[in-house]
Image (spheres, coloured by chain):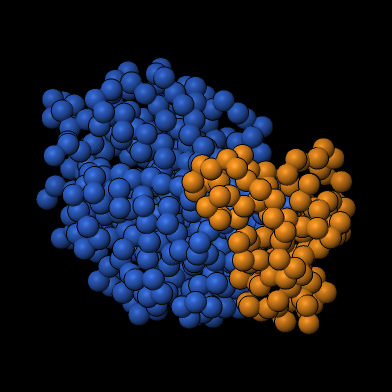
């Protein structure tokens, strides 16, 4: 474990994913953000409320990383993707699929796993088909 | 019109590997060259802005402002500027603004970075810290990985592919062939790029700028100071702009666009009273091959989706209508991250005034633009330089 002190907001989000109740923060303007946020970065609005994250998202872009830093040395090669859930996008690793079969537009679900190298939690995505 | 800021002198160490020379010594060398070039005494300096990104990782060194001033032999208020790979570009802008506001007549700007004393994995981790520590690094995003995400989305939206990117690497290596300050004075071809080891799909090794050590410095003075002291300095900075974007790529409205660069360019063009059509050449931040494409589009030289074929079509090569990265760019000149922005100013100054090995490509040129980006362009700073002919 590299990160033994919790990071408020980030770890709360991962807990929520593990509990099957992932959420994002919505501002009065309708913008979506990941925590921790004190205000909407675009509008400065402070009334952010937790909203349920849609069950599935869509791969916006992805890459297979072969040369990793020390924290992911034993994980490489691994696929990183940005996934749009509509109001908010999340960055994580795509699992349970051959890297060559990951595609932009693919539908995925969110989850949390541990990394091979450090055992820290990592956001992951699973293709729905 | 507000007066410009004269580039009195520039200096730059050769960029490369090695790794035993400290950042402070490299900056001392670059500053010494800049003072010799400027013919301005050290005791005239009223302020120092010094760029460095990863000194805490590589040298366990913080608080580098006064360290840099001392290394340069200067006693003046000194501040370290950290803006990832845009650190010394921002240092240049701070110096420019200090003079433009009338608060100083002489400012030393520059930056240095020592990288290759770290192993490649450790340096990779240090560079990744320019991304979002919670939402990107924890997911395994590396610096090449972040730009790969941008490249793959670019291909999806606009077309183009690895071969187009390879032409950018080939061009920039070609430009660096005779540049003795460049890390790679080696010709490569498209197949070399396509066949290289994969770093992050779609990037092979030759799509990535190298880990480098090096420093750059510039002595900036007010036009009044230059006139009073009879300085022979035909190049001036006419405009500057800087902007920011949402920090994490996932929060951007469009992955293959760089609004921070678009806004920084708008500011710089307005400041200079010029537009993209008035610029004859550009040194852009090609940390990865796709980054040159994103820069050319954000700076208004190409429409979105059209920059990808610029090198392939020969438009941005040394004999093209709009040569880009005549120094070799970050790709071939090298990328000691905290030195890069000021190195662009140093190389552009030499290119415009005629004492660069590639100046012959710019015989009638009057204006050049520099574009220095931090992180995945969450920071960007643009300068427009002009030469008196």
Q: Which residue is drawn at 71% across and 66% down?
A: A54
Q: Which residue is drawn at 48% across and 34% down?
A: B81
Q: Is residue A79 above or below residue B3?
A: below
Q: Where is residue B118 in the image (x, y as percent from the top left)?
A: 68, 45
Task: Name the spot of residue B208 as percent of width and height, x first.
Answer: 55, 63
Total numbered badges shown on the rendered structure: 0
Q: Position of residue B369 (x, y in %)?
A: 30, 54
Residue B58, compared with residue B208, is above or below; it is above
B24 to the left or right of A98: left
- Depth check, front residue: B132 or A38: A38
As rendered, which of A54 and B370 lies closer to the eye?
A54
In the rendered structure, the colour chosen for chain B is: blue
Please indicate, yes or no, whether residue B104 appears anywhere in the rendered image: yes
Measuring 23% from the left and 36% from the top, which residue is drawn there? B5
The answer to whether one can see residue B189 in this image is no
- Residue B168 occupies which quadrant of the picture? bottom left
Which quarter of the image is occupied by the N terminus of chain B?
A: top left
Q: Residue B299's x, y, as percent?
A: 34, 60
Please give the name of the residue rendered at 54% of the width and 27% of the height, measured from the top-left corner: B64
In the rendered structure, the colour chosen for chain A is orange
The picture quadrant where one finds residue B329 is bottom left
Up-down relation of residue B219 to residue B375 (above or below)? above
Left or right of B316 on screen, residue B210: right
Quick one: A14 or B227, which is closer to the camera? Answer: A14
């Amino acid at each position: 474990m590299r990160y033994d002190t919790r990071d408020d907001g980030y770890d709360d989000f991962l807990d929520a994913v593990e509990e099957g109740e992932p959420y994002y923060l919505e501002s009065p303007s309708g913008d979506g953000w990941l925590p921790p946020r004190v205000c909407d970065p675009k509008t400065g609005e402070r009334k952010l409320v937790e909203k349920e994250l849609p069950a599935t998202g869509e791969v916006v872009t992805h890459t297979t990383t072969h040369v990793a830093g020390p924290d992911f040395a034993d994980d490489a090669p691994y696929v990183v993707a940005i996934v749009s859930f509509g109001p908010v996008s999340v960055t994580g690793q795509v699992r349970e699929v051959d890297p060559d079969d990951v595609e932009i537009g693919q539908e995925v679900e969110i989850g949390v796993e541990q990394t091979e190298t450090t055992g820290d939690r990592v956001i992951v995505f699973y293709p729905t088909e | 019109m507000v007066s410009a800021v004269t580039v009195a002198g520039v200096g730059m160490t050769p960029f490369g590997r090695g790794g035993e020379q400290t950042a402070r010594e490299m900056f001392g060398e670059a500053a010494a060259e800049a003072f010799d070039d400027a013919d301005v005494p050290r005791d005239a300096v009223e302020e120092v802005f010094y760029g460095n990104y990863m000194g805490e990782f590589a040298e366990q060194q913080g608080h580098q402002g006064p360290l840099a001033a001392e290394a340069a032999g200067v006693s003046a208020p000194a501040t370290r500027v950290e803006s990832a790979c845009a650190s010394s570009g921002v240092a240049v802008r701070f110096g420019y603004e200090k003079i433009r506001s009338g608060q100083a007549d002489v400012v030393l700007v520059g930056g240095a970075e020592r990288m290759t004393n770290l192993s490649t994995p450790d340096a990779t981790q240090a560079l990744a810290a320019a991304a979002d520590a919670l939402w990107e690094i924890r997911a395994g995003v590396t610096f090449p990985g972040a730009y790969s995400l941008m490249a793959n989305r670019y291909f999806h939206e606009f077309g183009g592919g690895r071969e187009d990117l390879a032409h950018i690497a080939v061009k920039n290596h070609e430009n660096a062939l005779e540049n003795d300050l460049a890390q790679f004075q080696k010709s490569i071809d498209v197949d070399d790029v396509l066949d290289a080891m994969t770093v992050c799909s779609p990037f092979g090794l030759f799509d990535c700028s190298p880990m480098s050590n090096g420093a750059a410095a510039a002595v900036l003075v007010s036009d009044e100071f230059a006139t009073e002291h009879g300085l022979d300095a035909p190049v001036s900075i006419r405009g500057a702009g800087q902007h920011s974007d949402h920090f994490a790529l996932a929060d951007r409205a469009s992955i293959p666009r760089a609004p921070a660069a678009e806004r920084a360019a708008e500011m710089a063009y307005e400041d200079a009273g010029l537009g993209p059509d008035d610029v004859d050449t550009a040194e852009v931040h090609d940390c990865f091959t796709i980054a040159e494409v994103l820069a050319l589009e954000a700076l208004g030289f190409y429409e979105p989706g059209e920059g990808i074929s610029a090198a392939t079509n020969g438009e941005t090569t040394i004999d093209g209508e709009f040569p880009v990265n005549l120094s070799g760019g970050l790709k071939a000149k090298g990328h000691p991250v905290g030195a890069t922005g000021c190195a662009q100013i140093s190389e552009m100054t030499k290119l415009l005034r005629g004492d660069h090995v590639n100046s012959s490509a710019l015989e009638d040129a009057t204006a050049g633009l520099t574009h220095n980006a931090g992180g995945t362009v969450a920071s960007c700073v643009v300068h427009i330089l002009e030469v008196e002919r």
